[in-house]
Image (spheres, rainbow, N blue to C red):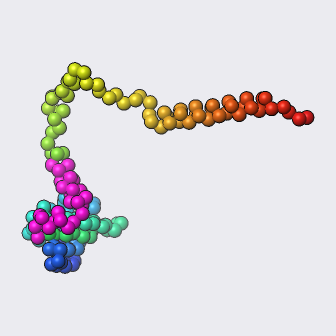
Amino acid sequence: MKVEVLEEKENPLLRRREIILRVQTSPTPKREEARKAISQALGVDTSLIVVHKIHQEAGKEQSTIYARIYKDKKTLTDIDAQYKITRDERKAKKSEEKTEPPESALGEEKPASKEGEVEEVPSQEPLEAQEKGAKKEETGEQGASSASAEQKAPTDQ
């Protein structure tokens, strides 16, 4: 991945660098790939990088990455939005988990439930079908009462 720094701005008040990079790549890079490329290009720790946005124009094999590089971990957690930090960390963990085989593939079985515990079993009927059935019952009752009212009313001819 070819990385080119377009703009770099030092923000001493927030103790971070705000950078804009251009990356030559065919598919849009994943956030973890972008963090690794920034880390290698600028020589910083990946845990201090928050990828703010990745933009790729249609038909072009280049992406623009907006990122923030913090001075330390405490400043990062104090200033940046928590969901952005956890989003980057969560995606990194998912990529690590894909390389390891799942526990169920190792032949381990689900532990048996303790005596007296009740397991929840999901309904066989989808929720939408249950709601439709309830609506039909409501309209059916109203339709029957209005039909009986019409029969009782005298007709003028």
Range drawn in magenta: 71-96
Residue drawn at x 58%, y 31% is: 137
Please provide percent x and percent y for residue 73.
11, 64
Name the residue located 62 percent from the left edge and 35 percent from the top edge. 139
- What is the quadrant of residue 144 in the picture? top right
Q: Nearer the viewer, residue 78 or 72?
A: 78
| The one of 26 and 80 positioned closer to us in this rendering | 80
85 in the magenta segment = yes
Residue 126 seen anywhere in this rendered image of the structure: yes
Q: Quadrant of the N terminus?
A: bottom left
Q: Position of residue 143 (x, y in %)?
A: 67, 33
Q: At 24% from the left edge and 70% from the top edge, which residue is drawn?
A: 66
Residue that extends furthest to the right in the rendered view of this protein: 157
Check residue 107 for magenta coloring. Answer: no
On the question of residue 23 being in view, the answer is: no
x and y percent of residue 2 in the render? Answer: 18, 69
For this rendering, which residue is in front, 76 or 48? 76
